[in-house]
Image (spheres, helix red, strand yellow):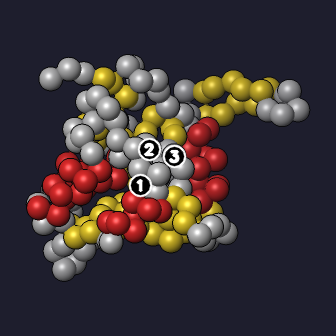
Amino acid sequence: MSKLVNNASREAVIIERIPFPVWKTIELGTYHSVDDLWSTLKYQGYKLEDWSKMIKRFSFVLEKVKTRIDLVKVTPAALGLTEETATLQEIYKCVRGYGLKPCPMEVAPQLRLQYRNQPIGECLKVSIENFGNFNEELYAFGIEHNYGRELRLDEYHIEPDGTWFPDISWIFTPSGVVGGGAIQTFSP
């Protein structure tokens, strides 16, 4: 599928859309507070970075109503970024051309709770709408099932000009509007 768009110079440019399949659909808005979410993660035995530091670093907002959100797993290579490494800015710019966008902040901890059968050795970087900015340093989330058999929710320090290998898996969501498309509100 192709999409015709206008660039800054008003010339017509065709952007090819790769139909990335929905990898997983998860629920958001299932907790009333960040503390409730943290307690559940801890009670269920997930390994967490220092949660209080995470909350300070990120402007953490939970959905007020239960919603479902589709997630897409992509690598820089699948996006056409096949050089030895790609910057985060290149990755984010590229996914927008394919109709994807960063995930709401709540996705990372909810994905950790709802992805219990994560294969050992898999580490996913979860894109987020606004990277946490703490003392002018950028942080993001990761979901990992390490070789020590721990299911983890981690944070990553991101260098603004840092690069990522083409085979690193990232989680994004299809562009959509609440109530349709990638995000659907529902009543229990």
Q: Quadrant of the N terminus?
A: top right
Element carrying mark 2:
loop
Whether pointer 3 and pointer 1 mark residues with C-beta atoms closer than 8 Å, the reply is no
Whether pointer 2 and pointer 1 mark residues with C-beta atoms closer than 8 Å, the reply is yes
Q: Position of residue 41 (x, y in %)?
A: 19, 58
Q: Quadrant of residue 116?
A: bottom left
Residue at mark 2:
103
In space, the residues marked 3 and 2 are separated at their CA atoms by 6 Å
> In this rendering, would 132 be left or right of 48?
right
Residue 4 sits above or below residue 51 on the image: above
Can you tell which mark lies on residue 129?
A: 3
Residue visible at 20% across and 50% down in the picture: 36
> In this rendering, would 55 be left or right of 11?
left
Label 2: few (<14), some or many (≥20) within 10 Å?
Answer: many
> In this rendering, would 57 be left or right of 15?
left
Whether pointer 3 and pointer 2 mark residues with C-beta atoms closer than 8 Å, the reply is yes
Residue visible at 30% across and 23% down in the picture: 185
How many marks the image carries: the answer is 3
In space, the residues marked 3 and 1 are separated at their CA atoms by 10 Å
Residue nearest the viewer, comparing 42 with 21: 42
Residue 63 appears in the figure: yes
Dot 2 amino acid type: Cys
Q: Quadrant of the C terminus?
A: top left
Residue nearest the viewer, comparing 149 with 74: 149
Dot 1 amino acid type: Val
Q: Position of residue 65 (x, y in %)?
A: 29, 28
Residue visible at 83% across and 34% down in the picture: 8
Element carrying mark 1:
strand
Residue at mark 1:
126
Element carrying mark 3:
loop
* Mark closest to the chain's N terminus, 3 or 2: 2
Residue visible at 69% across and 24% down in the picture: 4
